[in-house]
Image (tube, helix red, strand yellow):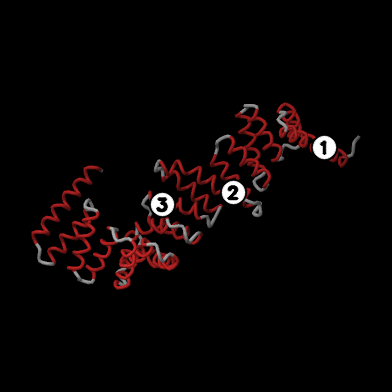
């Protein structure tokens, strides 16, 4: 009778030989030999994740798709902490077009092998590839849980945080969008898109305005030739009804670099309104209206300030124009 220890040693030797032979055959494209050896290895060690992931690739190459998927599931369940298995699963899922599963496996690999060159970047790219069609189709409710899981697995990724911010913006979850855009900036302070996105929702995020203003000020200081940087900083100050003279100086710097920017002229008009400098505000609104005549808000402000400056006929004309533009916009909706 063979002693138990000797039996185990022989079994292990047989397993190692079968696994090695199966992997070599798989690498060389000899699928019949790979299948024979890997199935033999699985019988000797049915809880070995590496065997199962190799079997998944072998079954898939043999067009046994259901068996391939079952084998991949076994590998994922048995070897969640094995970086080799997770990397192999990422490859298998990528090759079979299961991009989200590939992203999850690649993120697991990145976490277990933090020194692996390019592993984290590949995981980020896969998550973005998985969610991009959903964002393009504006399926934000479907994209949100995927991206939330992605940023938990891969924190401080500017690309994923930005995508999550866009998703929350699409869902009108503005505070969460702002937080994601702020995290994007913290991860990569020179990417412009999160600043642009924050500038569009200033009136929706009053509790986040101090943090946003701080980031805008820092960006403006680093980009002294960017007219949008001056304007966004001014808009953040105006949204808090603070430092109007500073806001005016910033807008003038923006206009010096980009004099035909209707938004800058409109924003300057709003700051001048707050300072009750109505004739000057009228001039800015008139310039904004000349540059973008289809903007209802500009005509509304002009009507109000024409009344304030004693020009009722002009005010009435602007109110009529405002009503016409609003009606046209509602018809389009």
Residue 47 left/right relative to 251:
right
Please state the horizontal and vertical placement of residue 191, each as a whole percent of the image. Answer: 46, 57
Q: Quadrant of residue 47?
A: top right
- Which residue is nearer to you in this view: 6 or 143? 143
Image mark for residue 168: 3
For residue 272, above or below residue 102: below
Spatial CA distance of label 1 from label 2 is 34 Å
Please state the horizontal and vertical placement of residue 163, each as a whole percent of the image. Answer: 46, 50
Q: Residue furthest right?
A: 1
Please state the horizontal and vertical placement of residue 18, each as a whole percent of the image. Answer: 78, 34
- Residue drawn at x 15%, y 59% as measured from the top left: 303
Tag 1 secondary structure: helix
Which is in the foreground here, disc 1 or disc 3? 3
Whether the residues at callouts 1 and 3 have beta carbons within 8 Å, the answer is: no
Counting residues from the start of the chain, the first of labels 1 and 3 encountered is 1
Counting residues from the start of the chain, the first of labels 1 and 2 encountered is 1
Spatial CA distance of label 3 from label 2 is 23 Å
- Residue drawn at x 19%, y 49% as measured from the top left: 325
Image mark for residue 41: none
Residue that badge 2 annotates: 107
User: Image quadrant for the N terminus?
Assistant: top right
Residue that badge 1 annotates: 11
Tag 3 secondary structure: helix
- Residue drawn at x 37%, y 56% as measured from the top left: 174
Please state the horizontal and vertical placement of residue 105, each as a whole percent of the image. Answer: 60, 44
Spatial CA distance of label 1 from label 3 is 55 Å
User: Image quadrant for the C terminus?
Assistant: top left
């Amino acid at each position: 009778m063979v002693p138990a220890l000797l039996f185990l040693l022989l079994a292990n030797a047989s397993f190692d030989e079968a696994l090695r032979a199966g992997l070599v055959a798989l690498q060389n494209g000899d699928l019949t030999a790979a299948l024979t050896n890997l199935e033999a290895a699985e019988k000797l060690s049915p809880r070995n994740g590496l065997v199962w992931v190799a079997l998944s690739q072998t079954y898939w190459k043999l067009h046994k798709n259901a068996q391939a998927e079952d084998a991949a599931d076994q590998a994922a369940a048995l070897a969640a902490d094995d970086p080799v298995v997770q990397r192999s699963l990422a490859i298998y899922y990528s090759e079979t077009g299961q991009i989200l599963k590939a992203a999850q496996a690649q993120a697991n690999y990145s976490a277990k092998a933090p020194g692996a060159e390019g592993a984290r970047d590949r995981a980020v790219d896969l998550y973005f590839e998985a969610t991009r069609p959903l964002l393009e189709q504006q399926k934000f409710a479907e994209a949100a849980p995927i991206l939330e899981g992605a940023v938990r697995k891969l924190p401080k990724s500017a690309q994923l945080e930005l995508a999550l911010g866009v998703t929350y913006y699409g869902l009108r979850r503005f505070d969460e969008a702002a937080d994601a855009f702020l995290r994007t900036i913290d991860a990569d302070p020179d990417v412009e898109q999160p600043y642009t996105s924050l500038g569009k929702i200033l009136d929706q995020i009053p509790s986040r305005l101090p943090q946003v203003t701080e980031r805008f000020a820092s960006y403006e200081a680093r980009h002294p030739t960017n007219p949008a940087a001056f304007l966004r900083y001014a808009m953040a100050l105006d949204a808090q009804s603070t430092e109007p003279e500073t806001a005016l100086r910033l807008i003038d710097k923006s206009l010096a670099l980009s004099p035909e920017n209707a938004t800058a002229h409109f924003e300057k008009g709003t700051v001048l309104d707050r300072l009750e400098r109505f004739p000057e505000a009228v001039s800015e609104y008139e310039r904004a209206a000349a540059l973008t005549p289809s903007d209802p808000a500009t005509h509304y402000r002009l009507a109000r300030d024409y009344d304030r400056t004693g020009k009722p006929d002009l005010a009435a004309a602007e109110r009529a124009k405002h009503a016409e533009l609003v009606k046209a916009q509602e018809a389009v909706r």
